[in-house]
Image (spheres, rainbow, N blue to C red):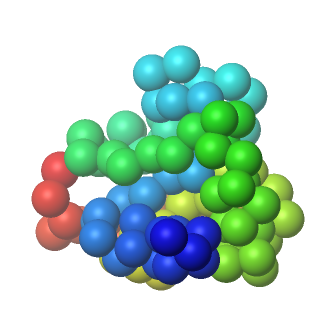
Amino acid sequence: MDIQKLIHEQVTSHPVVLYMKGTPQFPQCGYSANTANILRACGVTDLFSVNLLVEHDIREGIKEYASWPTIPLVFINGEFIGGADITRDLYQSGELQKMLAGLPA
């Protein structure tokens, strides 16, 4: 399957998607850990994550798909939200909680 199609399928078939280094249970960088923790703090339990340390094709493809050069990347309902700093800022302002309200936990 074409990488861009695979990424599109991933972000549109899961309510919350996190492309990160490592896994939510065992993050491999501080930014990925913080982002996963923020999503957990918002009550997200049905988190689809992709470990970009092992998914090399997706690692390059997601940067093109989102037009975003850094990892992690967060998608909610198929929409690219941002990276670690934007996710943190949205959480601190309460906007992230609003975006996640009503989604399956």
Taking depth in this image into account, of 4 and 91 the one nearest to the observer is: 4
Of 97 and 35, the residue lying toward us: 35
Q: Residue furthest top?
A: 26
- Of residue 101 and residue 28, the one placed in the foreground of this image is 28
User: Is residue 31 at least partly visible in the picture?
Assistant: yes
Q: Residue at x 68, y 77 (%)?
A: 66
Residue 8: x percent and y percent?
47, 77
Q: Quadrant of residue 73?
A: bottom right
How far across and down, in percent of the image, does residue 103 sit? 19, 65
Q: State left or right for residue 102 relative to residue 99.
A: left
Residue, x 67% and y 78% (percent of image)?
65
Residue farthest along the right direction in this orientation:
69
Where in the figure is residue 61, as x and y percent of width and height? Answer: 71, 67
Q: Quadrant of residue 100?
A: bottom left
Q: Is 105 above or below relative to 6?
A: above
* Number of marks in picture: 0
Residue 98 in view here: no
Q: Is residue 6 left or right of residue 100?
A: right
Residue displayed at 77% across by 61% down:
60
Q: Residue at x 38, y 39 (%)?
A: 41
Relative horizontal placement of residue 62, taking residue 5 as reference (left or right): right
